[in-house]
Image (tube, helix red, strand yellow):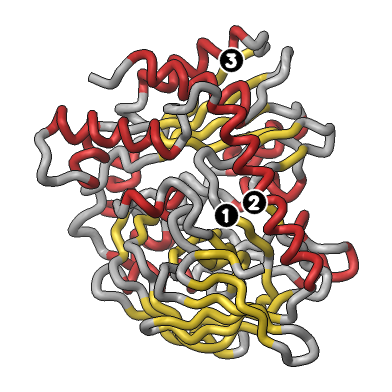
Amino acid sequence: MPDPETIQRLAELIVRFGANVQPGQIVTINSEPGKEDLARAVADVAYQEQARFVDLDVFDVYLKRSRVLHADEATLDFVPPWYGERMRALGEHRCARITLSGVAAPHALEGLDPARVGRDILPATREGMELLNARSTNWTVSPSPTKEWAALVHPRADGEQALELLWEQIARVCRLDEADPVAAWTSRLDALEASAAKLSERRFAAIHFEGPGTDLTVGLLPGGNWRGARFSTVDGIVHVPNIPTEEVFTTPDPTRVDGVVRATKPLFVAGALIERLRLRFEGGRAVQIDADQGADIARALAARDEGAGRLGEVALVDREGRIGPLDTVFYDTLLDENAASHIALGQGFGFLIDDADRDAINTSQIHVDFMIGGDDVAVTGMTTAGETVPLLRQGTWQI
């Protein structure tokens, strides 16, 4: 069984620091079966912070399996209108949003038609990305270990040992082993913001990734800015959207991405596993997508709409974080993307771009991160004058 004290400390960090729940706010918790202990602890702390109401929304991937298996082909991308209405209402009411991540049912979609799996993007919604760009809600995502997830990450350990080990790792990467986790995170976020400020100041024209299987140039928008994961709502509520977080990121030019890239970690998306993903870009668009496993799912996602095959994010991760040194594949994007530099197909972040260039960002119903960095992947900045500036070497900042 997970340590009740660890669950309590994580719940307090999620509510009081990550989402920064304010008195009188409505709080939504997005969860899955098997995460009840942390969900209940989060609700308890939220009410201690004088939340007006805590609403629990549980998504069961086995219902998704039934849909993919039996539903009419023409209905697989249908989303009931009240999903969007709910997201818009969350913004209108300035709610706090908390999502508990982690694979709850890693094998639920095995054996299904990959193309059909890729058609159903739930629980993600287009309105969710719109809500993010509107900055109307304070929100955070944090991992919640389950037995099923632990067995996937640590297959050689028995059930209880695997769960205990996963909880130990989550406590480590969330800095719960510190006497004051909030102070530890504040220091780390300050360092990330300092790196982001240096990148923004240089106004690079492009970023180049080079390593085994990777030779990729990602063009940047002139009005693009780099950020760490310390956000503020339009009402001034400071929050941390990812706990843990180790990245600095921006939104690239979706028309200027060229070359080949190899994913350095597996990707678990749409309830399915994609192994050794490889893409080739021309003029910003992914024109070739291959993988040792799950290629059809990746292709279906990239064909979702006009922007799904273009980039909406590029993020850099140094080796000073706590996730990478564990040398563990978590099969959870929240964790794996903060172990290595990454890019994302789909929707860009308008709040990172100056007004003059904001209409140039990519738009899509999806936002799918995948990891492309590592100690053997060099990251270089390219200036408008044609200079090259080392940014990351062996995972260490050079600026």
Give the left or right position of residue 38, taking residue 378 as reference. Answer: left
* Contact check, label 2 and label 1, Cβ < 8 Å: yes
Label 1 to label 3, Cα distance in Å?
27 Å
User: Residue at 39% of width from left, 56% of height from top?
Assistant: 269
Identify the residue under disc 3.
Answer: 46
In the displayed structure image, the side of residue 50 where residue 179 appears, left or right: left
Which quadrant, please, contains the N terminus? top left
Disc 2 is placed on an element classified as helix
Looking at marks 2 and 3 on the same chain, the residue that comes earlier in the sequence is marked by: 3
Residue denoted by label 1: 247
Crowding at label 1, few (<14), some or many (≥20) Cα neighbours within 10 Å? many
**Residue drawn at (46%, 19%), measured in percent from left and top?**
9
- Above or below, 112 against 26 in this view is below
Disc 2 or disc 1, which is closer to the eye? 2
Name the image quarter holding residue 251: bottom right
Question: In this figure, which residue is indicated by the disc labeled 2?
Answer: 192
Give 205 or 101, whichever is nearer the viewer: 205
Q: Position of residue 349 (x, y in %)?
A: 70, 58
| Location of residue 26 in the rendering, given as x and y in whole percent from the top left corner | 66, 20
Q: Residues within 10 Å of mark 3 (few under 14, many from 20)?
A: many
Q: Amino acid at mark 2?
A: Leu
Give the mark nearer the N terminus: 1 vs 3: 3
Is residue 95 shown left or right of residue 33?
right
Kindly identify which numbered label has been placed on residue 170: none
User: Quick one: which residue is furthest to the right in this view?
Assistant: 356
Which is in the foreground here, disc 1 or disc 3?
1
